[in-house]
Amino acid sequence: MAKKTQKHAYVIFDDTTSIQSEAYQKLQINLDYASIDEKYRVISCISPTKGEGKTTTLVNLANIYSLKGFKCIIIDLDLRAPQDHKFFNLVNDKGITDYLSNKASKEEVIHQVKEHLSIITSGSTTPFPSKVIESKKLKDLIEELKGEYDYIFIDTSPVLLFGDAVVISTFVDAFLLVVAMNITRKSELKEALKMVETSHINVVGTVLTHADNKARKYKYSYGYGYRYNNTNN
Amino acid sequence: MEDNSKEQGISLSDILFIIKKRLIGIIVIVLLFVGFGVVYSFAFNKTAFQADSCLYVLYKDNTNDTTGPNISDINYGRLAPKTLTDSLLNDPNVWKKIEKVATEANNKLPEEERIEVPDYLKIGKSIGASYDDKLESLMFIITYRGATQKEVLLMINACCEGLIGISEDSRDLNGKATGPLGYFLISRAGGYEVSLDEVYVVSQSKKTIILIAGCLGVVVGIAYAFIRELTNQRIASRAALEDLTDIKVIGVIPEFVDKGGRKNG
């Protein structure tokens, strides 16, 4: 479980010179490098448990792509604890669940929040979130959106709590595994990795969030007798 | 894109980082130790007194000559103080003798000056003895530690008299020394008398105790920091993450704390 419930700031880092924004830009570049052979257009972030920065990473990564001129859309499929709308100060009244249950049209649920960035919030709460995620209509929507957007970012539930990531892996090209420094337990990460492996979820990279700036040097050396060498990347 | 440096082991900055990370815990531990030191120094550190006396050890075939060591005595100079020091520290019969001498001396004192003579086991615990074997000295130091000045004064003298008595008791009818202790004649160092002024305080000062407690606190605090770090069950570094998985780390997002203290990662 996450270490503690923290007060959370729903921040999108638009100042491209800020440390956080630069970190997301670096993540975007690394992700592009990882998808040289096979272009990843449907991207999702997963984490072992909640409170590890999965949604923040996803939203800010989408923002970076949109700032670079790519047309992006975020879909909040974390139906049990939707957060994405809070980043854009939206009211979560009409969203993906409403569209999938034919209570709203596609146009009604897509909110354009920035020039190249749109979002489909989770919408009305549903007692059967798994059913919604497994629906054929969702897959069809993703296919449709692929024709309209350069990148689709899908938020989902923590992998150790729910099996949503396995279900969406059928239409997600690449997953990023989000791990929070000093929050994620090693045992939780191991369990999540085991689950990822058995479910054949395509995790293309890990993202270390809540990184302590002071730990920059320390993080490379302590306790392992070697420093990380990225020359093989 | 990434740091390509290859360095081995823990550097000084790593150690400082760990200490800084656990600084609050270390400070708490140091304060706890200092607190214990203060409580101990005021509540449990009772004042103790000590006195030293000096005895000569003589080996004598001619027991009539007690003026001092002669040339033949020097051959035994190294052995004599050691044998007697061992006897003094380990032989309950010697302690019993001292108890007997002390009781007799105590009974001779005016009633208001008398003390409660410790039993021989307690005497054994209160006695110290030393000699300088390198110098082949025929002299050894005897020490007694007790709770009151009066007790120490009485007992240090009883120790000396007891030992002298032991050697004298060990002579045969012809005046020749017999038995393990009987080969030695023991006499007080010339003109050396322990007086009340020479009984000194030996308990540690409060400042010293608090200082030692503080130093111990720092050592324990730092040990705590490293143990916590080594047993940390959470991902504490990028290296820890890389150690657990072959999946590449493609992003490191620094923690962001806004003006309201809300975190984002």
Image: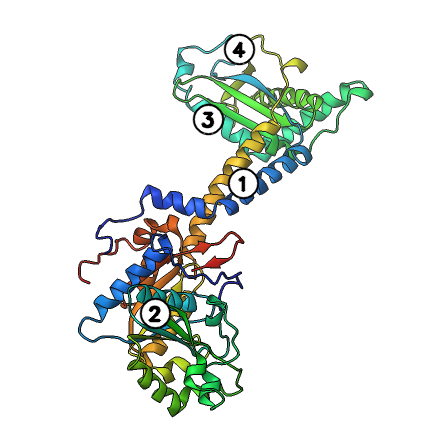
Type of the residue with mark 2: His
Type of the residue with mark 4: Asn
Q: Is residue B170 visible?
A: no
Chain of the residue under the numbered disc 3 shown in the image: B
Badge nearest the viewer, 2 or 4: 2
Type of the residue with mark 3: Lys
Could you tell whether B112 is left or right of B66 in the image?
A: right
Badge 4 marks a residue whose secondary structure is loop
Do the CB atoms of the residues marked 2 and 4 lie less than 8 Å apart?
no
Badge nearest the viewer, 3 or 2: 2
Q: Is residue A128 above or below residue B28?
A: below
The CA span between labels 3 and 2 is 95 Å
Res B114 → quadrant: top right
Badge 1 marks a residue whose secondary structure is helix
Chain of the residue under the numbered disc 4 shown in the image: B
Name the residue tied to disc 1.
B30
Q: Residue at x 52, y 14 (%)?
A: B63
Name the residue tied to disc 3.
B82
Residue B177 pos. (x, y %): 52, 21
Could you tell whether B220 is left or right of B199 in the image?
A: left
Name the residue tied to disc 4.
B64
Q: Residue at x 58, y 37 (%)?
A: B34
Name the residue tied to disc 2.
A116
